[in-house]
Image (cartoon, rainbow, N blue to C red):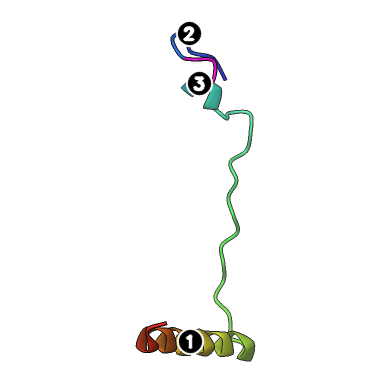
Amino acid sequence: MSRSPDEDDGEWAVSLDDLDGEDEEAYEPEPIEPGDPTVEGAAFVVLGAALTLVVLFSGL
């Protein structure tokens, strides 16, 4: 990073040249494939929905 001459000692300025990133490969995450729901996953969804309704209607 380069320092800007008109800024205080605590301030930094970044130019686009500092961020070019041509040397590094771009990170591309693997796509998430759909799958069959598990009993544990379905239970967490039902529990979360029930807890949300309890909090909304009880005014906690």
Q: Amino acid at mark 2?
A: Pro
Q: Is residue 48 above or below residue 3?
A: below
Kind of element beneath mark 1 = helix
Residue at image position (37%, 84%) is: 59
In contact (CB < 8 Å): disc 1 and disc 2:
no
Residue at image position (43%, 9%) is: 6
Question: Which mark is on residue 51?
Answer: 1
Q: Position of residue 44 (x, y in %)?
A: 57, 85
N-term-proximal mark, 1 vs 3: 3
Gap between marks 1 and 2, in whole Å?
Answer: 56 Å
Which residue is the site of mark 2?
A: 5
N-term-proximal mark, 3 vs 2: 2
In the displayed structure, does residue 55 sit left or right of residue 18?
left
Q: Amino acid at mark 3?
A: Glu
In contact (CB < 8 Å): disc 1 and disc 3:
no
Which residue is the site of mark 3?
A: 11
Question: Which mark is on residue 59?
Answer: none
Which secondary structure class fits the magenta region best?
loop
Q: Is residue 59 above or below residue 5?
A: below
Nearer to us in this view, 23 or 7: 7
N-term-proximal mark, 1 vs 2: 2
The residue stretch that appears in magenta: 8-12
Residue 18 belongs to magenta span: no
Q: Position of residue 7 (x, y in %)?
A: 46, 14
Kind of element beneath mark 3 = loop
Q: Position of residue 57 (x, y in %)?
A: 36, 89
Mark 1 nearby-residue class (10 Å; few <14, some 14–19, many ≥20)? few
Q: Position of residue 38 (x, y in %)?
A: 62, 87
* Residue that sits furthest to the front in the current view: 60
Mark 2 nearby-residue class (10 Å; few <14, some 14–19, many ≥20)? few
